Image: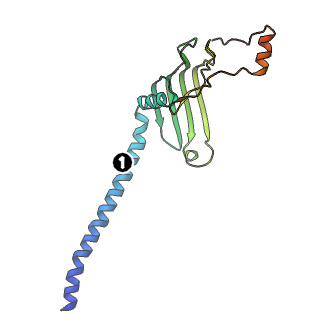
């Protein structure tokens, strides 16, 4: 009789354990399936608005990206189209950087460990303007964590100072 009571009490425990095991397995399988579908759907989503907002906040300048797509695989493809990074106030042009098209293939495993391995880099219509404003502010310094990365007074290197005193001005930037 005691053995029959033990068997009756252990039967519901076995069923509960089986339901828990099946439930956890189902949740894990659903997670793997959702991750796989998301990974392959990533190539069909334009991530430009997210990247533009993040880059604008990071650089402290307006950044616009028309198209950003990521193609998953062993070699992850990243393609940018019509990228514009604003110049500093007082610059000679409205944009410091203009890129018509930029594509890069990066080895997926290198993103997690070791140096990043790049297979192909393709670019079209790349224009980068590096200059100082008439006030001496360099446009290649960006805002980092709420502080402008420009020194309060732009120091003059000794070689340039010698040229200026001799009546020679350093070359001005051109487009």
Q: Position of residue 118 (x, y in %)?
A: 61, 38
x 39%, y 48%: residue? 35
Residue linked to disc 1: 34
Q: Quadrant of residue 127?
A: top right
Q: Secondary structure at mark 1?
A: helix
Query: 72 or 98, which lies in front?
Result: 98
Quick one: quadrant of the N terminus?
bottom left
Q: Horizontal placement of 151 versus 85: left or right?
A: right
The structure residue drawn at horizontal position 52% and vertical position 14%, both measured from the top left corner, is 94
Crowd class of label 1 (few under 14; some 14 to 19; many from 20; radius 10 Å): few
Q: Nearer the viewer, residue 51 or 59?
A: 59
Left-right relation of 14 to 63: left
Classify 4 as above or below 164: below
Looking at the image, residue 39 lies above or below residue 94: below
* Count of residue discs: 1
Query: What residue is at 58 percent from the left and 46 percent from the top?
Result: 110
In which quadrant will I find the C terminus? Answer: top right
Q: Residue shown at 74%/10% (left/top)?
A: 169
Tell me residue 55's x, y (percent): 49, 30
Give how far across and how far down residue 124 sits, in percent.
Answer: 57, 21
Report the coloring of the rendering. Answer: rainbow
Residue 20 lies, in percent from the top left, at 29, 66
Q: Quadrant of residue 45?
A: top left
Farthest top residue?
A: 167
Return the residue nearer the eye: 158 or 32. Answer: 158
């Amino acid at each position: 009789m005691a053995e029959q009571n033990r068997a009756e009490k252990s039967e519901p425990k076995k069923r509960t354990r089986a339901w828990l095991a099946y439930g956890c397995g189902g949740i894990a399988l659903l997670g793997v399936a959702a991750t796989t579908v998301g990974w392959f759907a990533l190539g069909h989503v334009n991530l430009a608005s997210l990247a533009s907002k993040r880059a604008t906040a990071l650089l402290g300048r307006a950044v616009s990206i028309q198209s950003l797509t990521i193609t998953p695989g062993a070699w992850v493809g990243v393609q940018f189209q019509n990228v514009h990074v604003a110049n500093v106030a007082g610059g000679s042009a409205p944009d410091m950087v203009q890129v018509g098209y930029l594509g890069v293939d990066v080895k997926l495993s290198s993103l997690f460990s070791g140096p990043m391995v790049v297979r192909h880099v393709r670019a079209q219509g790349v224009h980068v303007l590096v200059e100082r404003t008439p006030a001496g502010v360099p446009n290649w310094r960006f805002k980092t964590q709420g502080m402008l990365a420009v020194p309060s007074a732009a120091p003059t290197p000794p070689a340039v100072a010698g040229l200026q005193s001799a009546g020679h001005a350093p070359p001005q930037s051109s487009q």
